[in-house]
Amino acid sequence: MNFKYDIIVVGGGHAGCEAAAAAANLGSKTLLITMDMNKIAQMSCNPAVGGIAKGQIVREIDALGGQMGIVTDMTAIQFRMLNKSKGPAMWSPRAQSDRAQFILKWREILDKTENLSIWQDTVNSLLIEKNVIKGVKTNLDVDFYAKSVILTNGTFLNGLMHIGATQIHGGRISEPASYGITEQLKEIGFTIDRMKTGTPVRIDGRSVDFSLMQEQQGDDDFHKFSYLDFHPRPLKQLSCWITYTNEEVHAILEKGLPDSPLYNGQIKSIGPRYCPSIETKIVTFAEKTAHQLFLEPEGENTQEYYLNGFSSSLPLHTQIDALKKIPAFRNLHIYRPGYAIEYDFFDPTQLKHTLETKRIDNLYFAGQINGTTGYEEAAGQGLIAGINAHLKNNSQDEFILKRDEAYIGVLIDDLVTKGVDEPYRMFTSRAEYRILLRQDDADMRLTEKAYNIGLATEERYALLKEKKEEINRIIDFTANYSLKPEYINPCLEKLGTSPLRQGIRLKDLLTRPQINFDNITDAVPALKNEIEKINNRKEEILEATEIQIKYDGYIKREKLIADKISRLEDIKIKGKFTYEEILSLSTEARQKLSRINPETIGQASRIPGVSPNDISILLVLMGR
């Protein structure tokens, strides 16, 4: 066996899989090292991909040539577009996946990827010489050498699980923790801390009375994650189910709080604000008499269900006793209880925007090791780390997405600029340019960039060009086609919108909220003729076209703002100042600028504690 590679990826979760696939597809000889080859891309928590802002990240991964969107579409057992009642900047795709099929599909992709090898083992130390990574040493006492190493260890670094007073060392239930890397990097000088997260009970569906729950079906339309042109949803589509806790449930949970590791001092690490345990909910929202729970299917051919909203570290008997007070669960049987897990992470301000560490050359971190939570955030980081490791090894320019280009850009900039004080989760509210970062146009924003570095395929690029041409053709037609009142007013009156008094361009009429391609096409034969010329992905193209027409003014205004602010991103300051010597800066600014050492004025302006006055001082010193 050859023990020398271009890139080694440590960890076969969502970050590791995307990193390894991207590096290999770009041409790097890549080795993925994972503890268990049968749990590649395991969905450790809920069997779902996407959601608010997370769905946008998955579409960006797909647009860049990543794999998560493809795998999700091929294994989806339910798909929904969330927030459709709001503006398109808020639309967010989400899918339930068959957990077992998700692993198999990812494994199939990796096994077929050229330049990629897999090794089943645990890495317990890094090979470092003069602050440059050289490779890794494994539990089987094998040394693997590489130009770059990407760590995607998830929750496995010194992982410790809690179920009441019971403590189990491991990174996931029934899987061992990883030791050695944290201690080695801490000795080198890396800043390390602990985080916690949790997962709910898994329920046997045969013990559930579904007649006492509200059914939540998926969408039955053209939407999917991947922009590639294949038929989605090959698996049977299943429903989710909604129920609620009640006062009896809360009483049992409150009685069990002294035995909760989250409340008795057993767990001291940082926990998630946006995915709280059921214990946290009943304490924080003590006035509420009920909390919504979602019962989500784990797969097409299993009775296992995930109880979303009931993460817990309470003792086993407390979890069961409380759940049995919910009418639908009165005959409850479970596969395993919920548990909390603590694990090591590294302060992400120790990273560059490429996700390479500042302290060790050619060492990259991606995923929960950086203090994030969520499969999607991890996958996005893994993709960027894999791309940049390959580009640096080949002396090519780094690949960095800006905040106005991608949610992935917002995610990474937030991490390396601000750090984290709780597990980071992406929301649309974190993105100041969300009108530009919609889920429908991720390919328009990113595929050409990925094609230019060699990751997006000819097939993807051809589909993008076809889509652009069709959108522009339809927009041009609507901009140049005029409607006369006598022909269109009967249709407008039926749709409950004001009739015309004079002629109007079709494009201007389409800006009305009551008007869309679906309800006006039959009344405008020339438009129908233009639409019939679209050969492939008609619904996707029409939706994207309509959004561009309706929100053209908002899009242009936000783009103008982004362009103005982006000028600060072009002012490079790294290496130009000794901040501690600039006494006109505030003490906090001197300390934080010295620690983070920002690349640009733009990044410096986003560091908490650096004021506009501090930025003005730096601009004056730059002669601006």
Image: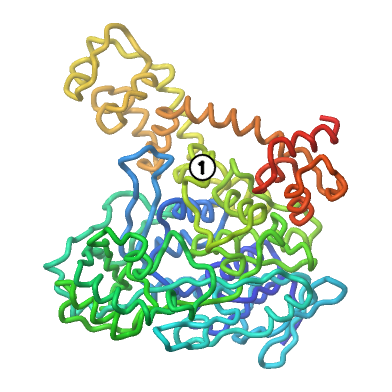
Where the C terminus falls, by quadrant? Answer: top right
Residue at x 68%, y 78% (from the top left corner)? 182
Q: Quadrant of residue 465?
A: top right
Which sits in the foreground, 566 or 282?
Answer: 282
Which sits in the foreground, 249 or 348?
Answer: 249
Compared to residue 492, the image places residue 470 above or below, namely below
Compared to residue 231, the image places residue 190 above or below, namely below
Can residue 104 be seen in the rendering of this structure? no
Q: Is residue 192 left or right of residue 44?
A: right
What's under tag 1, amino acid-wise? Leu
Residue at x 77%, y 72% (from the top left corner)? 189
Residue 424 in the image: x percent, y percent? Answer: 53, 59
Farthest residue to the bottom: give it.
140
Instruction: Provide the residue designation for mark 1.
Output: 437
- Badge 1 marks a residue whose secondary structure is loop
Residue at x 73%, y 76% (from the top left corner)? 186
Q: Residues within 10 Å of mark 1 (few under 14, many from 20)?
A: many
Q: Is residue 154 left or right of residue 249?
A: right
Residue 172 in the image: x percent, y percent? Answer: 48, 81
Where the N terminus falls, by quadrant? Answer: bottom right
Farthest residue to the top: give it.
502
Residue 85 in the image: x percent, y percent? Answer: 30, 41
Residue at x 43%, y 16% (from the top left corner)? 480
Can residue 361 be seen in the rendering of this structure? yes
